[in-house]
């Protein structure tokens, strides 16, 4: 299957940022930047799609804690963030860790939790860095750890989305270079996974559609108020067990 190694690729990606920026900036840039804005939008999306106090949320590929940081004063439930990059896990724990918000280093394709224990499993911009087969394995894991009626929320680079085409062109320019994968997905691929795993599709939203209502307005990284209806920048899919 070639030399793709998500762990090494992402650890090297983070090391490059750490070498050039102060820690907080490096930890934001290495997950794509806009730390407060994206975290706040991810939080709004989860609340809109039914996450409630008392629930158990597992955040796979939690990165440096963008979502956890946005949730910590708003979500009174259990949270587990896992990631393959130890620097991310340490940092996320330092800014959002608590008795109910745990962070663990992950092996990469399994979720360290027992079956039927979680209400929500989210993957924000994680399938973006995995081969389709690897994402499918994670999807299966998410199904295992979810309670019946629990939900998977994930974002993805969408081959049919015009605003993502420049990323595809970037991949073309990067052919032959040792950079981390920017993997594209499409609705038909996801539909097959859902069917094979006997899950139920609840929602599929294009990146260009501002379908996320910001219930609690918040300030972004530039001091601007984020309010109204927004989009995450990637397409979003919501699936029920
Ligand atoms: C673009 S970042 C997004 C981070 C976070 N979800 C967010 O929205 O801020 C992608 C994340 O996926 C993580 N990742 C990549 N491969 C992974 C894997 N196999 N298992 C868990 N995390 C992985 C990376 O380390 C990185 O933290």
Image: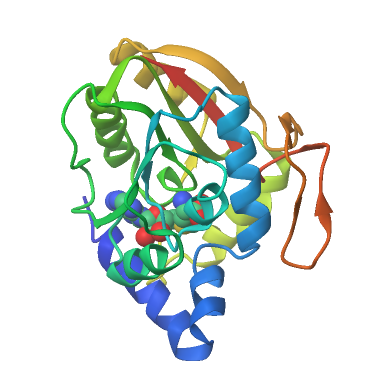
Where residue 52 sits in the image (x, y, percent)? 51, 27
Along the horizontal axis of the image, is 8 left or right of 125?
left
- Of 168 and 222, nearer the camera is 222
Residue 13 is at least partly visible in this image: yes
Residue 182 is at least partly visible in this image: no
Quarter of image, res 194: top left
Residue 233 vertical position relative to residue 22 in the rendered view, above or below: above
Give the tally of numbered discs.
Answer: 0
Quarter of image, res 181: bottom left
- Of 163 and 126, nearer the camera is 126
Where residue 180 sits in the image (x, y, percent)? 40, 63
Residue 76 vertical position relative to residue 182 in the rendered view, above or below: above
- Of 177 and 14, nearer the camera is 14
Quarter of image, res 141: top left
Residue 203 vertical position relative to residue 154 in the rendered view, above or below: above
* Quadrant of the snapshot with the C terminus: top left
Where residue 158 sits in the image (x, y, percent)? 58, 37
Instruction: Kindly identify the residue that appears in the image at 52 percent across and 56 percent down.
Output: 69
- Report the coloring of the rendering: rainbow
Where residue 239 sits in the image (x, y, percent)? 45, 19
Instruction: Kindly identify the residue that appears in the image at 74 percent across and 59 percent down.
Output: 220
Instruction: Kindly identify the residue that appears in the image at 36 percent across and 11 percent down.
Output: 195
Instruction: Kindly identify the residue that appears in the image at 64 percent across and 59 percent down.
Output: 36
Q: Where on the image, by quarter, is ligand 1?
A: bottom left
Residue 13 vertical position relative to residue 54 in the rendered view, above or below: below
Along the horizontal axis of the image, is 137 left or right of 21?
left
- Of 71 and 185, nearer the camera is 71
């Amino acid at each position: 299957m070639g030399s793709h190694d998500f762990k090494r690729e992402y650890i090297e990606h983070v090391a490059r940022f750490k070498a050039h920026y102060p820690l907080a900036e490096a930890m934001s840039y290495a997950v794509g930047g806009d730390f407060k804005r994206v975290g706040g939008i991810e939080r709004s999306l989860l609340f809109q799609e039914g996450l409630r106090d008392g629930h158990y949320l597992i955040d796979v590929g939690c990165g440096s804690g963008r979502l956890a940081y946005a949730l910590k004063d708003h979500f009174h439930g259990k949270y587990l963030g896992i990631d393959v990059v130890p620097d991310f896990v340490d940092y996320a724990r330092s800014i959002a860790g608590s008795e109910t918000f745990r962070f663990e280093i992950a092996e990469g394709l399994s979720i360290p939790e027992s079956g039927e224990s979680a209400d929500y499993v989210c993957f924000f911009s994680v399938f973006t860095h995995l081969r389709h087969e690897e994402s499918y394995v994670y999807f299966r894991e998410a199904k295992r750890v979810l309670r019946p009626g629990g939900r998977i929320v994930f974002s993805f680079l969408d081959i049919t989305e015009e605003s993502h085409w420049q990323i595809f062109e970037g991949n073309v320019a990067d052919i032959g270079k040792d950079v981390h994968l920017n993997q594209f997905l499409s609705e038909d691929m996801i539909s097959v996974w859902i069917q094979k795993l006997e899950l139920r599709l609840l929602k599929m939203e294009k990146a260009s559609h501002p379908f996320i209502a910001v219930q609690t307005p918040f300030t972004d990284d530039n001091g601007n108020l984020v309010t109204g209806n927004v989009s995450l920048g990637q397409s979003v899919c919501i699936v029920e067990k």
